[in-house]
Amino acid sequence: MNRRNILLASAAAAAVFSSSLAMAQDAPIRLIVPYAPGGPLDVTARALAERVRESLGTVIIDNKGGAGGNIGADAIAKAAPDGLTIGIAATATHAVNPWLYARMPYDAAKDFAGITQMVRVPNVLVMNADKAAQLKINTVADLIAYAKANPAKLNYGSGGNGSAGHLAGEMFKQRAGIFALHIPYRGGNPAQLALLSGEVDFNIDNLSTAAPNIRAGKLKALAVTSLHESPALPGVPPLSNTFKGFAIDTWWGLVAPAG
């Protein structure tokens, strides 16, 4: 997803958002983002805040990262249902974490009122471009062959336990029959910085986060996690070419506290 698509998604969400909160309050609206600043979800939230400023007034972005998004999602769930606090739900916070964590601080099915879906975007398997060149890894097959020849040597990063990148990484390991140590970060942006610095070997990252650094030649794209090639990354094959049916994308939506 490029900046234009982020703005289009934000504009669509803004229309629904403004309609659902037509009776604007004098107090500012708090928009909770359950991940660290700088990631694609944060960028989308800030674009949305700008879009609704005229109709709803000030929207304050409140980043509450940690615990795979659970800290921020719990803050949304426990806020007063007065229209002044809303938040962003994600694949991890509402679809994955309830199955991943033994004790959840909120009920994903009951503690939220849905407003609208905002974004659905694939992920991309990426390596640090210099590291990929050093190891002579140009394809998914090269990465798998290296991992099998060097067991327990690779690691990968994600935006947190239960994130789409974590889920996709574990599925990739299982289908490929390889091991790579998972290192969770407090959001997609810190995970990508770790990849750029060489702290981790590969990520399965949100396409909108990774695309600028892929185009800049800093990251090497090996595959996308959609069933078909993405128009945003022409020439990059889908993982489903290697593993039949492999498809994991990321969705984000707007929610409010139930009540």
Image (tube, helix red, strand yellow):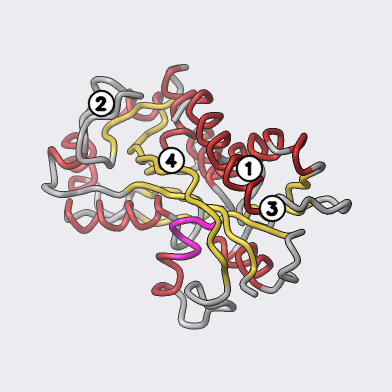
- Disc 3 crowd, CA 10 A, few/some/many (<14, 14-19, 20+): some
- Residue 75 sits in which quadrant? bottom right
Residue 219 falls in image quadrant = top left
- Quadrant location of the C terminus? bottom right
Q: Earlier in the sequence, mark 4 or mark 1?
A: 1
First-in-chain label (2 vs 1): 1
N-terminal of the pair, mark 2 or mark 3, is 3
Considering the numbered disc 4 on the image, is that residue within a helix, a strand or a loop? strand
Report, in whole angstroms, how far the alpha carbon at label 1 lies from the one at label 3.
Answer: 16 Å
Q: Return the residue at label 3.
A: 21
Question: Around disc 2, counting alpha carbons within 10 Å, would you say few (fewer than 14), some (14 to 19), or many (20 or more)?
Answer: some
Which mark, by number, is residue 45?
1
What's the amino acid at mark 3? Leu
* Distance between mark 4 and mark 2 Cα atoms: 15 Å
Determine which residue is flagged by label 4.
206
Q: Quadrant of residue 54?
A: top right
**CB under 8 Å between callouts 2 and 1?**
no
Amino acid type of the residue tagged 4 in the rendering:
Asn
What is the CA distance from the residue labelled 2 to the residue labelled 3?
Answer: 41 Å
Q: Give the Cα distance between marks 3 and 4.
A: 30 Å
The amino acid on which the numbered mark 1 sits, given as a three-letter code, is Ala
Q: Name the N-terminal-most of marks 1 and 3.
A: 3
In the picture, the quarter occupied by the N terminus is top left
Q: Amino acid at mark 2?
A: Val
